[in-house]
Amino acid sequence: MLDVNQIKKLLPHRYPFLLVDKVLEITPDSITALKNVTANEEFFNGHFPAQPIMPGVLQVEALAQVSGIFALSQPNAPQNVTTLFAGVDGVKWKKPVVPGDQIKMVVKMIKLRNPLIVCQGTAYVNDEVVCEVAEMKMMILKQ
């Protein structure tokens, strides 16, 4: 399990763009993490003030950050690197994410061969799928 301070050692993201609060589990081929969605998130000021909904692109970004944590937490991971999005395919949003929700993100590794990471991810709220990504591609880059 990783807390937010340990996550910050792996990812360069900071508030308001760090979208992972805790890692629950890392297995050889997957990772499970949490994002607590609070009413004071900056994006709710404009999306949408009368009916706040977490933007779908931020849900995908959160899944990508979880993928980066997985890749960078591996025992043989290179040092002084970060991950950047290289592509995304097959995204589906099933339900809106609103303030008070806790997103559980499960990312499965399809391929991890430096410098390419290919994953698929699913986000859940209350065990219901809210977002699915068939394929996320990231590149590992030196910082």
Image: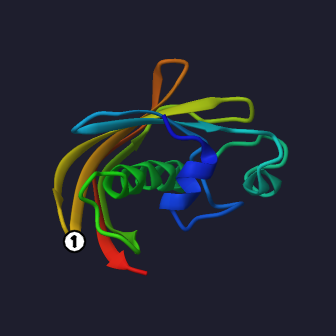
Residue 10 appears in the picture as rendered = yes
Above/below status of 80 relative to 1: below
What quarter of the picture does the C terminus occupy? bottom left
Q: Looking at numbered disc 1 in the image, what kind of residue is underneath it?
A: Pro
At horizontal 62% and vertical 30% (from top left) the residue drawn is 102
Above/below status of 44 relative to 131: below
Residue nearest the viewer, comparing 54 with 37 = 37
Q: Measured from the top left, where is residue 118 in percent x and y?
A: 22, 56
Q: Measured from the top left, where is residue 59 in percent x and y?
A: 52, 48
Q: Measured from the top left, where is residue 73 in percent x and y?
A: 36, 52
Q: As drawn, is 77 to the left or to the right of 93?
A: left
Quarter where residue 112 is shown: bottom left
Q: How many marks?
A: 1
Quarter where residue 81 is shown: bottom left
Residue nearest the viewer, comparing 134 with 104 = 104
At horizontal 71% and vertical 60% (from top left) the residue drawn is 16
Quarter where residue 133 is shown: top left
At horizontal 29% and vertical 37% (from top left) the residue drawn is 30
Q: Provide the residue designation for mark 1.
A: 115
